[in-house]
Image: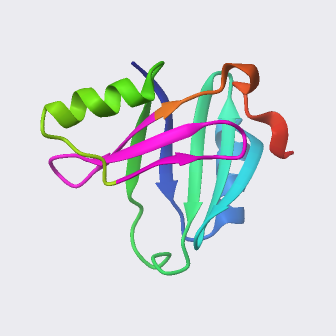
Amino acid sequence: MKLHHFGINVRNMEKSKAFYQTHFGFEEKFAAVLGKEHILFLSRNEEWLELIFDPNTAHLHSHVHFAWEVEDLEGEIKRLSLQGLDAVEGPIHLDNGWKAVFFEGSDGEVIELISINKKNKEGWLFL
């Protein structure tokens, strides 16, 4: 496994995007809408940052999740299930070929495992 991206719930998408672009050199790569959540992926070199805006929770402080990229998502789901850890969401399939599944950690943190379509690993389809 390796770290794939980290996500931050934001109060204002445009302000947060500008902050990470201006201060840390991130570039906008693609956006998605999942239910009420508006998601924007930024990258810098091989690092990915996911900004998440949900109008229902925008007034709350940021919640962070992290993701590990895995080669065999279904195998990892099965392995974790055998250890008593079941997914709380997913697997979901994004339009750019990524597949993800989410677990709840011992303190309520969100742990994501993600599988990348190697033919479109960078996810540039959405710009």
Q: Is 55 inside the magenta-drawn segment? A: no
**Magenta segment boundaries in residue numbering:** 89-113
Q: Considering depth in this image, is 35 or 73 the residue closer to the camera?
A: 73
- Say which residue appears at 43% left-offset and 50% top-offset: 90
Q: Where is residue 54 in the image (x, y as percent from the top left)?
A: 54, 72
- Quadrant in which residue 2 is drawn: top left
Could you tell whether 4 is left or right of 22 in the image?
left
Could you tell whether 76 is left or right of 50 in the image?
left
Q: Is 25 drawn above or below residue 39 in the view shown? A: above
Q: Is 35 drawn above or below residue 42 in the view shown? A: below
> How many marks can you see?
0
- Say which residue appears at 72% left-offset and 40% top-offset: 96
- Quadrant in which residue 41 is drawn: top right
Quarter that holds the N terminus: top left
Q: Is 91 inside the magenta-drawn segment? A: yes
- Say which residue appears at 82% left-offset and 45% top-offset: 126
Q: Is 126 drawn above or below residue 117 in the view shown? A: below
- Quadrant in which residue 119 is drawn: top right
Q: Where is residue 105 in the image (x, y as percent from the top left)?
A: 22, 46
Q: Considering depth in this image, is 10 or 36 the residue closer to the camera?
A: 36
